[in-house]
Image: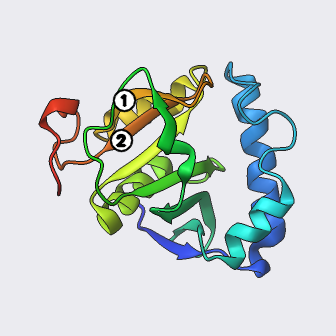
Amino acid sequence: MQKLSIQHCTMDDWDEILKIYEDARLFMAEHGNPDQWGHSYPPKKIIRRDIEKEQLYRCVLEDGRTAGLFWMSINEDTVFDELQEGSWPDDGPHATVGRIAANGIGRGVAGFCLDWAFSQSGSVRIYTHPQNTIMRSILEKHGFVHCGRVRSSVLLAYQRCCRKPQTAAASDCQDA
């Protein structure tokens, strides 16, 4: 089994980051989700800001190659302040994860990133597009529960707030 680790991205990773996100946009479009990231998300200015704030991470294989990327912040994302058609099972401190992208050179990369984020905070929130069936499946496999919609958009909000993967329901989540 491959050994994975998580590291902060730096500006030295810039070209690789852009390539991984470009490939992820193509992959999403080819798998029925052309609208979530379109042709240019995330924009370069957001990527640069994430690197500067040390909120962009890379999932690294044992041989040093980058297998995936994700953004994570702790208690900073206000997107989740306006949850609709549902409620959060836990309103306490949490990490927010987004912009997960893998390049296909490793297996289980997205799940590893989600589990790592959970290990850092004990509660993780994430949102995704309804057409992103691959991510929705990964989220459910890793103990996330669907909690509602973000703002007035179509984006679906998920949270993992307990250590009961696959069997967690919103009603039995507790602080980890």
On the question of residue 62 being in view, the answer is no
Q: Quadrant of the N terminus?
A: bottom left
> Is 66 on the left-hand or right-hand side of 163?
right
Quarter of the rendering containing residue 175: bottom left
Q: Position of residue 109 (x, y in %)?
A: 49, 52
Q: In which quarter of the image is the C terminus?
A: bottom left
Q: Can you say whether 89 is above or below 62 in the image?
A: above
Q: Residues within 10 Å of mark 2 (few under 14, many from 20)?
A: many
> Is 154 on the left-hand or right-hand side of 39?
left
Q: How crowded is mark 1: few (under 14 residues within 10 Å), some or many (20 or more)?
A: many
| Label at residue 77 | none
> Residue at label 2?
159
Foreground of the two, 139 or 129: 129
Q: Do the residues labelled 1 and 2 touch (CB within 8 Å)?
A: yes
Q: Position of residue 15 (x, y in %)?
A: 84, 67
Helix, strand or loop at label 1? It is strand
Q: Where is residue 147 in the image (x, y as percent from the top left)?
A: 36, 29
> Is 2 on the left-hand or right-hand side of 69?
left
Q: Can you say whether 80 is above or below 149 in the image?
A: below
Foreground of the two, 55 or 143: 55
Question: What's under tag 1, amino acid-wise?
Answer: Cys
On the question of residue 172 being in view, the answer is yes
Question: What's under tag 2, amino acid-wise?
Answer: Gln
> Residue at label 1?
147
**Alpha carbon distance from label 1 to label 2:** 7 Å
